Each structure stands twice: as structure tokens, then as C-alpha cells.
Amino acid sequence: MFSTLLQLPFPIVSRFLFARFLSGLFVILVCAAPTAVAQDKPAAEKNAQEIDPAFAAPPTDKPEDDAAKMPAKPETSAVDSEAAAAEMPAENEDAVPAEEDEQANPAAPLSEEDQAKVDELFTQAKQSIQAKEWKEAIESLEAALAIAPGNGTYHHALGVAYMGDQQPNAGWFHFRQAVRLNPDYVPATVDFMKTWKLLDAQGVFNVGTPLPLVAQTLGKPDQADDQGARLRLVYGFMSLNFMNSQLFSILDMRNLPPDGLHAVDGLAFDLPREDWKVAYRILSAAQGNTEYVRQDENLQRWTELFASQRFIGAARTQTAQDVMDGIRSRLEKAFEDVEFTEIKATPDDVFFRWSIGKSASHPAQQELVRLVAGQHDIHRLAYTRKGESLDDDTLSDWQALLADAELMTAENLREYLAEEGRKQQEQQLREISVQILKKQFELIRSGDVEALKPFFTEDSRDKITADLLKQTAEQLDELDPAEMVNDVDLSISDDAARARLLNKKGEVFTTLIQTDGRWFAEQVWMETIVK
């Protein structure tokens, strides 16, 4: 997945055509937009082109205990798919190197006797893989790794063998070990990303995916970095970054500076918050992307998208107009019916529109794109729509939105991002709280006092009694968790985080206190209900 992308300096289309043009690491981030934007637009917040700076650097090293706290690799998971097990070996029969790749093996040299032994085992394994004798290959490679556990080539070959033997979880594990030993080892990187792409297609890496689902699907992480409300799980060279137990962003850690990435500037733009949600975030040494989708859509099924993207360092070697010209050239080579219109064209700021008609291989698609060169990076905003053409009023509104986007300094962008992050945490807490209330309703109806207590602070737990639950249960049919937690007011200080849960009337329903990364209710809300 990465290798193809690295040959293309810029993407030319959004996610619908992603596989057609960019079957590599490049992910074009998109945000959904309304079918029509009314003249009286709803209140909008500034959005900015940057991932939380706290997640823009490699995670700190942690003791093995931190990773051990995470769920162990399950027997079955989303990796355990017929596609992963059946297709991977067939596509990788030539991926096992003819000779051991020394670049993939940074471990200490072996003795002559051990080296001769592992060479023999590896030769046997290659022959077994070529004959699709997977179990024999596994046996040989496991024996080789017992002698040379730091050998990336052996881990990669063992991953291929496990995939062929219909054991994709084990194959996924060894692909990860291979790329951790050497992220630049191309065969292992390709196979790691093939598995990653299968998971991505299932929505595992969408923003907001719950931590338990990710951990169960991917298995025990290779590294964990717990920072309370923030958590990182590392798989291979990918860091999955969580806030409040929901996936927030992805960081590709290859080739990152030791102190992380630091933006100098970026674009800020107005987008109605109530209509859109952040669906995907990824940051690498080459680019940063954020995708939004409509509230009722996701990245697996969308009709309209809005992309915010930065190409790191690109402004040092080319202009925004150079990039536009390259996009136009590639589109015209790929599609006979492409229509391309320049709206604005200066060396550092271009605005254009392109469209293609419906065919047997793809639906009709149109896209509005603005490219702006900053001090070091080139920034891209794009609105994409599949299907019917935009009417004149809607087209005009989207052109105005992109044209009004403002290039700002990193300092100003961070101010917007801090507010954006807080609002997103509030939304996440509301969604989580509604689900927790539904669970509490079940426990109240069953009268399970002890199971309810862990949801509350220690000082409040003695107030939870069987009699209180019995009285509350009589009124539950009149209560709606979504109305009980209509809004969240989050406040964060250096030493604590608190969240007031507000009901539909704007009254405080209860207050959540964060302790060791978990949220506990300070007030026993059932007391209020029975009064």
C-alpha cells in the first residue's frame, strides 16, 4: 500500500478514486457537506489543518507492563478474514527474498554454527513456501527465530507462511514485528499495509471507534503509552491515538523527527459543526490529512466529502500551480470525459473544479479544490460529490467556503484546534454517557447494586441501595438517556478534568470526574429521580 504511493508526490482525487490512482499510503481526508447550503448558514466553527500536536511525535518508550495491560490477541478478529488468509499468500509468493536481506536484520551477529543453522532453516522454509507447504515453512521459520529473534526477514517470511496456513492473526503479528525491526524493509511493509488496508476498509480506523473494538480486532499492541485521557497503541510503525477511549488519529511513525512534526502555518475554514463529523485523521512525515463526513454517513459509504490536507515541505520544491497542472494532466490521461475548469490561478493560490461522468467502473463525480502554498507546506481543501451535479446555488456556496479559507500561523491554528478538540471531547463524552446510562438502566431494573457502584466515585457508592434502585426502576420508562445527557460542559486543568452533564432543560444532571483515565459520576443521579 505504501510503495505505490511513494511514487506519487500528490493525490489527484478524493477517496472514491483513491484505489484507482493511489493504491499507496496516501489517504485523502474528506469531510461530508450538506446537500445544499442555505443562505442563512448555521453557526459554524473554525476548522484547521492540523492533528493534535500531542499526537504529532513518536510515543515515549514504556515498560512491557503497559502493553501487557491491553487485551491479549484474540483467537478470532477482523484480521481473521477469508480475504486476508486466502489472498495474502497468493500475492506474496515472490515476497520472500531469494536471499536473506541484511538490511532487515539489525540484530547482533550470530556465531558461525548458529548462522549455518538458520541459513539451512531459511532455505528449507523458502522451498516450503514455494510449494505452499505452509506448516513445514512455519516449523522451519519458528526454529530460525528461536535462534535469531531479531531477524526481520524471518518474521516477514513467517507472516506469509501463517497467512497461507489460514492463521491471519499470527501472520499479522509477524508482519508487525518485521516492520518494527526495520520500517524500511519493503516486502514486510507491503504485506503489513495489505492487512492494514483490509482493516481500514472495515472502518476499524474511523475516528470514534471504541478502544475495546480496536484492541479486540488488532490484538495486543506492540507498545502502549497511557497518558490518562490520552492513550496510544502501537502496531508495527502505526500509532493509534485515543482520547476518552475513542480513536482520535493515526500516526505513521516512519521517518519522523525525534521531537515530532511542527507546522508553521495552515488553512482555517468554516464548516457547520452540526452537519459534519470528523471521520478520519492521519499524519505522516510527508503529509497530514483530516476527513469529515455527514453525521449519518461514514467513510465506507458517503455521498459528499470535504478534504483538508497538507503536503509537508512541498512548497520548497514546487508551486501550487505546479501541483494543479500535475493533477489536470493525470486526470486527462485517466478519463476521456473529464471537465477541468480553473477558477483562480496564481503561483501560490489556485482554485479549480473538475468532474467526470458515470461509467461502468465508477459513478459520476465532481470536485472543487483549492491549493495554497504556505511557508513550507502546500495546503489542500476539496469538496467532493458523487452522483448528480451541483445546482448553481450550492456550487456558489461551496466555492465561497473554499475561497474564504484563511492561511494562518501555527499559533493561531492551535488556538482553534484547542477549542475544536474540547468540543469533540464533549461530543464523545455525551455519546459515551448515553450508552452508559442505557447500561445502568438495565442494572437498575435487575436490582444489581454492586454492578452499579463502579460507575460512581468511591464517596458516592454507599448511597446506592437496593431500595433506591427499586424506586428508580418504577420511573425508568419515563426517562430517555439522550434527553438526560443533552449536552456536556468540559473543563480541563493541569491536575484534573471534570465534565458537567446537562439535561434537555440545561440543568446539571451529574458531574463526571476523571481519575486514572476513567470517568466516574460524582452525584448519584437516581436520588434526584426519586425525589
Image (tube, rainbow, N blue to C red):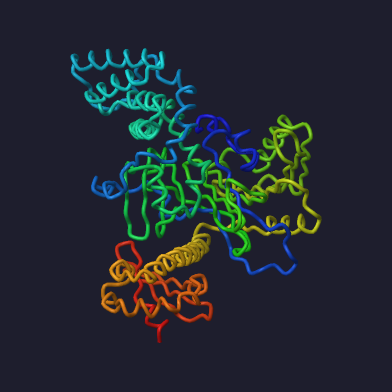
The spot of residue 222 in percent (x, y) is: 32, 41
Which quadrant would the C terminus be assigned to in this image?
Answer: bottom left
Lateral position of residue 102 relative to residue 264, left or right: left
The residue under the point 77% across, 52% down is 390
Residue 124 to residue 255: above or below: above
> Residue 444, how many percent across, how many down?
37, 71
Compare residues 103 and 469 and report the one nearer the observer: 469
Q: In this view, does 504 lie to the left or right of 78?
A: right
Location of residue 147 by image quarter:
top left
Q: Is residue 441 visible?
A: yes
Identify whether 30 is placed above or below 295: above
Q: Position of residue 359 (x, y in %)?
A: 75, 35
Q: Which of 305 and 380 is in front in this view?
A: 305
Residue 472 relative to residue 339: left or right: left
In which quarter of the view is residue 155 placed? top left
| Numbered circles on residues, count | 0
Residue 496 seen by the camera: no
Quick one: 92 or 422, which is closer to the camera? 92
Q: In this view, does 505 lie above or below 246?
A: below
Residue 182 place in picture, x, y as percent:
36, 31
| Residue at 40 percent of width and 19 percent of height | 96
Q: Which residue corresponds to the image point at 33% horizontal and 19% vertical from the top-left? A: 137
Q: Which quarter of the picture shows residue 125?
A: top left
Q: Residue furthest right?
A: 392
